[in-house]
Amino acid sequence: MNDFKNNVEKYMALINRKELVSPGPRILFMGIHGSGVHTQMNLINKNYKISRVDLTADLLALLKREKEERKRERELKRGFKPKEFDDEGEEVPDPEIEEDPEDFDIRAHEIDCLKRVLEQHNEILINANQFDLEEGLI
């Protein structure tokens, strides 16, 4: 470490400075209802052309798509099985298909999905308000 501190130029000469690109801004907005979060995001978007991301909607949509994909994969692996119906004629959900296996790490999956949502944009304004999110929606 001391070698680097004493000879910074020696190490910096190895880096092609033209290839270095600084990342765009990622600005996270949060606030209570009526605090002007959307207004501020609109102003910055209008003046600086930075794209907006509704983190809750985008993340929930991705998680829902992924869950449906996992359910479909489980259904295809199991093979055809006739649907079961209750006394009222409504379909009885199959827990083997509907629920993820116990060894599935939902937290790691949610973190991965969040990273994928954020990586889609170089410069973003993030609306991170999640006041109306129902418990267990994910």
Image (cartoon, helix red, strand yellow):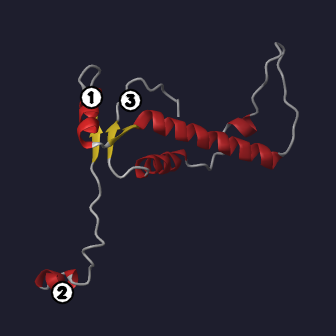
Going by the numbered disc 2, the residue's amino acid type is Lys
Q: Residue furthest top?
A: 88
Describe the element under mark 2 as helix, strand or loop: helix
Q: Earlier in the sequence, mark 2 or mark 3?
A: 2
- Any part of residue 100 in sight: no
58 lies left or right of 28: right
Q: Residue 109 in the image: state x and y as whole percent.
A: 53, 48
* Image point (44%, 50%), residue name: 120
Q: How many marks?
A: 3
- Position of 49 with respect to 10 (left or right) is right
Per the image, the residue denoted by label 2 is: 10
Mark 3 lies on a secondary structure that is loop
Residue indicated by mark 3: 130
- Mark 1 and mark 2 lie on one chain; the one further toward the N terminus is 2
Work out whether residue 25 or residue 72 is closer to the camera in this orientation and state it: 25
Q: Is residue 121 left or right of residue 40?
A: right
**Is 10 situated above or below 45?**
below
The CA distance from mark 2 to mark 3 is 48 Å
Task: For marks 3 and 1, give the CA distance.
Answer: 13 Å
**74 and 16: which is toward the camera:** 16
Tell me if residue 138 comes above or below residue 33 in the rendering: below
Snapshot quadrant of residue 41: top left
Q: Report which residue position mark 1 lands on.
A: 37
Three-letter amino acid code of the residue under disc 3: Gln
Q: Position of residue 84 (x, y in %)?
A: 84, 27
Q: Secondary structure beneath disc 1? A: helix
Return the disc, 3 or 1, that comes first in the chain's sequence: 1
Circle 1 packing at 10 Å, graded few (<14), some (14-19), many (20+), is: some
